[in-house]
Image (tube, rainbow, N blue to C red):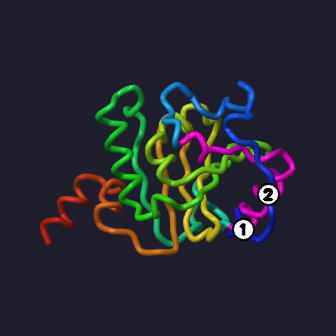
Amino acid sequence: MSQLPFAISTKSWLDLNENEKRFFEDESCLHPSQIEHIQLLKPAAARRFTTWAFSSIPSGFPDYDGGYPNKCKISIHDSWNDETSIQKIREWLHSLGIPLARDVHLIYDFDCVVQTKWNVVVRYWEKFAWSVGYAMTCIDHTLRWACCFHHEDVIVFESYFPLTLAQLTTSLPVSLLLLLLAQ
């Protein structure tokens, strides 16, 4: 990935053993053209990348006050195994405005970092998030945003760029949303 400030080494999906594929729930659903866009960083590269990323992401992301100035979130608690709900989350992820061809990294832990494209994350979010222990953080090389998939209940997106009303409304209580729409 040439946009990073350092070189990284990866293993392609086809070179991964079953244990190394544990971050993805069901590989049988993968379209062959998207398999080439999923790579696992080798352990030393994963540790270097994670150290770099977490030293640059604003402190407090995503659990505390602080972090990025613009925030939105969506509940995924009732979205598992329901294709309509899964599609709703895909649409929400797409609405975040990240270019679909953007290279991104999914950080599961210091030794497990996946490199892929944003469109692959949008399409298979539930397959990537299925194996999350505490959280999986998705970022790109700019570090101007971060998307955290918390263990089976919420996705938090934070950024330095302004969010749209559609993105924000998924985070608001219904009473506040109705008040805003009435104005």
- Viewer-proximal residue among 81 and 35: 35
Disc 1 marks a residue whose amino acid type is Leu
Q: Which residue is mark 2?
A: 8
- Left or right of residue 121: residue 17: right
Q: Residue furthest right?
A: 44
Q: Are marks 1 and 2 in contact (CB under 8 Å)?
A: yes
Seen in the picture, residue 47 relative to 15 is either above or below; the reply is below
Q: Is residue 42 magenta?
A: yes
Seen in the picture, residue 159 relative to 101 is either above or below; the reply is below
Q: Position of residue 145 (x, y in %)?
A: 55, 66
- Viewer-proximal residue among 158 and 87: 87
Give the image quarter of residue 14: top right
Q: CA distance from mark 1 to mark 2?
A: 8 Å
How dense is the environment of label 1, judged by Cα within 10 Å: few (below 14), some, or many (20 and up)? few
Give the image quarter of residue 67: bottom right
Q: Which residue is mark 1?
A: 4
- Left or right of residue 94: residue 52: right
Q: Position of residue 173 (x, y in %)?
A: 30, 53
Q: Residue furthest left?
A: 182
- Quick one: SS at disc 2? loop
Q: Position of residue 4 (x, y in %)?
A: 72, 68
Q: Is residue 37 magenta?
A: yes
Name the residue located 65 percent from the left edge and 50 percent from the top edge: 115
Q: Residue furthest front?
A: 33
Q: Which quadrant, please, contains the N terminus?
A: bottom right
- Viewer-proximal residue among 59 and 160: 160
The rendered magenta stretch, by its main secondary structure, is classed as helix
The boundaries of the magenta stretch are 34-56
- Quick one: SS at disc 1? loop
Q: Which quadrant, please, contains the C terminus?
A: bottom left
Seen in the picture, residue 42 relative to 160 is either above or below; the reply is above
Q: Position of residue 159 (x, y in %)?
A: 51, 68
